[in-house]
Image (cartoon, rainbow, N blue to C red):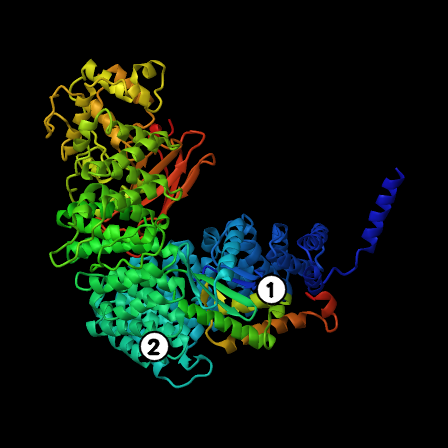
């Protein structure tokens, strides 16, 4: 089971955090700080896996963003790379060649997407189409609630 | 007054001016990103937070959603956002989907199962789980799956169970993972989900299939009963999993689930994992899955990571079930192929997996030895580390020569962090598999040369031990060591011929090779005469290494005078030099000068040694040959004892059994002898004379020995000194009376063993031990000496710090004389029930007034009978009462055990 997923930039700025196991806020901050520092100092030719406490860390860089997952000993690290890749593909489809700015300004959408791909630290849907369909339907629900022309001012904006 | 009024007016104006619509999320993000300094960012955030708080207080529901969204962004930047928790609940309770969507997102980010607020959210969740809109139910399930606490799990399990049977696949898959989370929190609830779970793996929808398989894995791993239930009640489970897997690999291209030509790798991997759980220790189930595993192993496209992910999982399953031997070979060969893959991630995974299987299928792994050794050259440190561990696991009697060649080459080139690990690994491997003594000695010497200062101390004591044991190779060892040190010290020439052992790579200065200098000093001191006589060849055919007395003394003098030599090295060297004075003839005068000079050395230990040894050149010159007699070959002992012996070059007090004598001899000449009769007053007098005289005693604490006092010692003290030799020869016995001194002395059985004790201290290496067995009836004068002598810390009892879960951790203590504030704790972790414990991690915490330094453990794997040791250095400048909490984690039989405890029985002598 995945314990948490972090997205952070090359400058070390956190862009998304998803915790599947309960941690006190302080611990979350410390873990994030430690991992960001460790991963940013690793050279590109090094492998994508780290042993860290009793967890395995799998990370991969896509353009300016690092995707970092913590999995348990019995989990498959190669497949975790595929999960990360699937998530990136989904974001890419949704935003249309996604970039870091899309995730900064629409961070809630990035969370929604992750929540349709994974649940409780496990993959819930293996079809890209189904994930995107669910997201589109929910976005539509949201739009229908907001009167036309009213959205800019009254929605999330 | 006027100012105050103005301020109030301004504030009111601000309030009125407050924008009718709050800052949009997008604008806030822009503002924050525009901030150029951290302070500027903080100002923007604080202002916005103040506004959001105010708006929350006013219970403004129109903008709540936007405000919470902004707060979530602020939360991600690391600012406190707990005040938004209740607002999230308000949003969840709203009928609007947008509100719920943000509310649930906020709940997942701002709450976790530790929050008391859960009682409130449980109600909302219950309502939403019954909502007719599937996406609202979906949001509730998603949130439950992320933050469910045990209470929430109990309250909502029946709702989840109902949804597990829903006709809607979108809800079924989410409910399955919620059930997965719930049984993780409250395993008793498992039974409730069992009936609905079985049907999940007959589903057509891949989402439902994968979540169903995930749920079954969790159930089977959590409860052996459920595992049996799935095996017995549902005999068709394995066949249906096999069918799904077969369809996946055989069916043609399906665009919906295709990943680079592989059909639904996520589902395949999960099914393989469930097969592994079901086939473990079950011959029948294993038999049923042999074929499909072979098919997956041979039919999977391997050009991409995704195919290798499946192969990797297949290999793990093959290794874990009772598979056919052919299949196991296939699995190891897949890993062998992985090792050659250009993708470093795949190489890493392969090494990791091989490491896990090497004990079960050693011969199969052996075939990939060359590839594994090749990985030692990998630029990636994690791959290097794995390859190194695996290489050590592969060493056996038949391949040790070839393996060692590679490992020594690696040792020479590797970074500091690998040198310690690699050299200790080589030492223990040679101990187990050396083809012969000569090779063993050669290898140890190579390690000393290649690893420089990055050696663990055990290597020094081990090498000395081996050299001492191998009586026929002592001369040879001295010769080789001499060649090594004389080419690395640079200033010294040697005219020896190159022998078999290639030491020419020794280019580092000797100051970078303190361990080598220590071993060389010890061996020169013991067997230096063979270097002069040319008895340094192991066989007739070889050309011996020869050196002149002056060269040897030059070398030792260079060590002694170098500012880069450590104190321990100098202690080795000084003792060696004194010993050489009895083995050499023409340089005795020089040696005496050098030794005498140390009488004024700044370091107290060296000064004391200098004065004591100088006595052996002047007053007690007659005793010198006997005292400096060659140490008899040390008896063999287990390597782990050597390990415990090795902190900071000193001794660790062991538990006072016969073994201790050998321990002591190992790091020089300390002996412990207990008295059986009260010493005669005359003896004590002479002892005290030697140690500085009665005057000092009368004045209270006796400082270090001063030479002026010692020079007044009556000649009778000779007799006592001689007894020391009795002590030295006393291997195996702890009482003087039972082993009469082998040297003819005029003193007989009336000698005082306490004298022995103290004299032993005089000759000992930096840390010395006093026997705790000194009877209380012993002479008060001696007692006084014992109480004040800085070189005699009280004996410290070993303590068992932890004894649970099949792991026992013992502490032994040492307080070095030169730093009484320092306590060196050597912990020995041993496995109790013959099982192998892996991933051993020991952590300790001490109060803030202490400083704790943990050295790396000798290994993370504890094999039964081979304890792991680890050294902690605790600095206690305040001499406070030492308290320690420890935290341990290790895996036994694949189960990770974590525990923490307080060490209660620490001896008070540690801080007194």
Residue, disc 1: B101
Q: Residue at x 69, y 70 (%)?
A: A146
Report whether residue B196 is seen: no
Using the image as rendered, state which of residue B288 and residue B240 is in the foreground: B288
Q: Secondary structure at mark 2?
A: helix
Using the image as rendered, state which of residue B29 and residue B601 is in the foreground: B601
Q: Residue at x 74, y 70 (%)?
A: A150
Number of callouts in the render? Answer: 2
Label 1 resides on the chain identified as: B
Q: Secondary structure at mark 1?
A: helix
Question: How far apart are the alpha carbons under marks 2 and 1?
Answer: 36 Å
Label 1: how many residues lie within 10 Å, few (<14), some (14-19) or many (20+)? many
Q: Nearer the viewer, mark 2 or mark 1?
A: 2
Mark nearer the N terminus (2 vs 1): 1
Give x and y (percent) for residue A9.
Answer: 57, 64
The part of the image, by quadrant, that contains residue B738 is top left
The part of the image, by quadrant, that contains residue B599 is top left
Give x and y (percent) for residue B67.
Answer: 68, 58
Give x and y (percent) for residue B524.
Answer: 23, 44
Residue, disc 2: B245
> In which quadrant of the rendered image does the N terminus of chain B lie?
top right
């Amino acid at each position: 089971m995945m314990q948490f997923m972090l997205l952070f930039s090359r400058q070390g700025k956190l862009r998304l955090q998803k915790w599947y196991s309960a941690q006190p806020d302080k611990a979350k901050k410390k873990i994030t700080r430690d991992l960001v520092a460790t991963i940013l100092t690793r050279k590109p030719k090094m492998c994508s896996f780290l042993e860290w406490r009793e967890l395995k860390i799998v990370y991969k860089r896509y353009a300016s963003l690092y995707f970092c997952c913590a999995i348990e000993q019995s989990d498959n690290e190669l497949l975790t790379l595929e999960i990360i890749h699937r998530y990136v593909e989904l974001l890419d489809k949704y935003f249309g060649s996604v970039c870091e700015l899309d995730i900064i300004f629409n961070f809630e959408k990035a969370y929604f997407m992750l929540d349709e791909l994974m649940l409780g630290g496990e993959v819930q849907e293996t079809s890209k189409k189904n994930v995107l369909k669910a997201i589109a339907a929910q976005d539509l629900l949201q739009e229908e609630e907001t009167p036309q022309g009213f959205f800019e001012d009254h929605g999330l904006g | 007054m006027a100012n105050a009024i103005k301020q109030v007016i301004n504030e009111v104006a601000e309030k009125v001016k407050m924008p009718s619509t709050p800052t949009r999320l997008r604008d806030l993000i822009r503002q924050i990103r525009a901030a150029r300094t951290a302070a500027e960012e903080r100002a923007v955030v604080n202002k916005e937070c103040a506004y959001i708080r105010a708006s929350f207080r006013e219970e403004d529901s129109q903008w709540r959603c936007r405000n919470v969204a902004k707060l979530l962004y602020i939360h991600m930047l690391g600012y406190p956002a707990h005040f938004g928790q209740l607002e999230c609940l308000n949003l969840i309770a709203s009928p609007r989907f947008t509100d719920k969507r943000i509310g649930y997102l906020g709940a997942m980010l701002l709450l976790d199962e530790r929050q008391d607020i859960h009682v409130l959210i449980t109600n909302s969740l219950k309502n939403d789980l019954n909502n007719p809109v599937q996406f609202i139910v979906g949001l509730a399930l998603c949130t439950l799956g992320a933050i469910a606490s045990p209470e929430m799990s109990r309250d909502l399990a029946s709702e989840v169970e109902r949804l597990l049977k829903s006709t809607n696949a979108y809800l079924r898959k989410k409910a399955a993972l919620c059930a997965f989370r719930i049984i993780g929190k409250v395993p008793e609830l498992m039974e409730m989900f069992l009936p609905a779970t079985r049907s999940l793996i007959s589903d057509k929808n891949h989402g439902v299939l994968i979540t169903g398989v995930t749920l079954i894995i969790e159930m089977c791993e959590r409860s052996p009963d459920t595992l049996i239930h799935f095996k017995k009640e549902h005999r068709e489970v394995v066949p249906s999993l096999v069918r799904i897997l077969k369809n996946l690999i055989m069916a043609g291209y399906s665009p919906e689930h295709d990943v680079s030509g592989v059909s639904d790798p996520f589902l395949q991997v999960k099914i393989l994992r469930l097969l592994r759980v079901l086939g473990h220790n079950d011959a029948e189930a294993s038999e049923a899955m042999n074929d499909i595993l072979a098919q997956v192993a041979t039919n999977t496209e391997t050009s991409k990571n995704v195919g290798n992910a499946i192969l990797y999982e297949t290999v793990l399953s093959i290794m874990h079930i009772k598979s056919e031997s052919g299949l196991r070979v296939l699995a190891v060969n897949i890993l062998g192929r992985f090792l050659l893959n250009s993708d470093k991630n795949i190489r890493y995974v392969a090494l990791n997996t091989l490491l896990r299987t090497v004990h079960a299928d050693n011969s199969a792994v052996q075939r990939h030895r060359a590839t594994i050794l090749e990985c030692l050259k990998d630029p990636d440190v994690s791959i290097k580390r794995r390859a190194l561990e695996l290489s050590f696991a592969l060493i056996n009697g038949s391949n040790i020569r070839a393996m060692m060649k590679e490992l020594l080459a690696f040792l020479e080139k590797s970074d500091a962090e690998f040198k310690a690990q690699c050299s200790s690994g080589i030492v223990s491997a040679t101990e187990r598999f050396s083809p012969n003594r000569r090779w063993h000695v050669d290898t140890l010497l190579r390690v000393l040369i290649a690893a420089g200062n990055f050696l663990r101390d055990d290597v020094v004591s081990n090498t000395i031990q081996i050299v001492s044991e191998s009586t026929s190779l002592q001369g040879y060892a001295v010769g080789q060591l001499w060649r090594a040190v004389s080419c690395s010290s640079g200033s010294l020439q040697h005219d020896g011929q190159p022998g078999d052992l290639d030491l020419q790579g020794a280019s580092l200065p000797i100051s970078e090779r303190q361990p080598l200098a220590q071993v060389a000093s010890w061996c020169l001191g013991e067997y230096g005469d063979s270097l002069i006589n040319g008895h340094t060849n192991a066989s007739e055919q070889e050309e011996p290494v020869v050196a002149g007395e002056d060269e040897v003394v030059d070398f030792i003098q260079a060590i002694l005078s170098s500012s880069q030599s450590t104190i321990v090295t100098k202690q080795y060297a000084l003792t060696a030099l004194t010993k050489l004075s009895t083995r050499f003839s023409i340089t005795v005068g020089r040696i005496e000068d050098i030794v005498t000079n140390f009488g004024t050395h700044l370091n107290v230990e060296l000064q004391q040694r200098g004065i004591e040894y100088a006595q052996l050149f002047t007053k007690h010159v007659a005793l010198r040959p006997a005292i400096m007699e060659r140490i008899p070959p040390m008896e063999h002992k287990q390597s782990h004892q050597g390990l415990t012996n090795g902190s900071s070059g000193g001794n660790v007090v062991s538990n006072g059994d016969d073994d201790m004598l050998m321990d002591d001899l190992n790091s020089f000449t300390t002996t412990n002898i207990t008295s059986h009769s009260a010493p005669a007053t005359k003896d004590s007098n002479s002892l005290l004379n030697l140690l500085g005289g009665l005057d000092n005693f009368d004045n209270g604490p006796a400082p270090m020995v001063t030479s002026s006092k010692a020079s007044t010692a009556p000649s009778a003290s000779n007799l006592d000194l001689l007894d020391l030799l009795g002590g030295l020869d006393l291997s195996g016995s702890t009482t003087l009376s039972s082993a009469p001194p082998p040297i003819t002395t005029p003193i007989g059985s009336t000698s005082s063993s306490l004298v022995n004790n103290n004299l032993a201290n005089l000759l000992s290496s930096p840390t010395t031990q006093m026997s705790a067995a000194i009877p209380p009836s012993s002479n008060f004068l001696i007692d006084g000496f014992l109480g004040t002598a800085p070189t005699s810390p009280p004996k410290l009892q070993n303590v068992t710090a932890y004894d649970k879960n099949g792991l026992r951790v013992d502490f032994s203590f040492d307080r070095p004389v030169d730093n009484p504030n320092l306590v060196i704790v050597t912990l020995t972790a041993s496995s109790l029930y013959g099982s192998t414990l892996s991933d051993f991690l020991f952590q300790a915490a001490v109060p803030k007034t202490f400083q704790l330094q943990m050295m790396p453990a000798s290994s993370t794997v504890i094999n039964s009978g081979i304890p792991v040791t680890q050294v902690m250095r605790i600095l206690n400048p305040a001499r406070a009462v030492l308290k320690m909490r420890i935290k341990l984690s290790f895996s036994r039989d694949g189960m990770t055990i974590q525990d923490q405890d307080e060490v209660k029985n620490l001896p008070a002598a540690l801080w007194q």
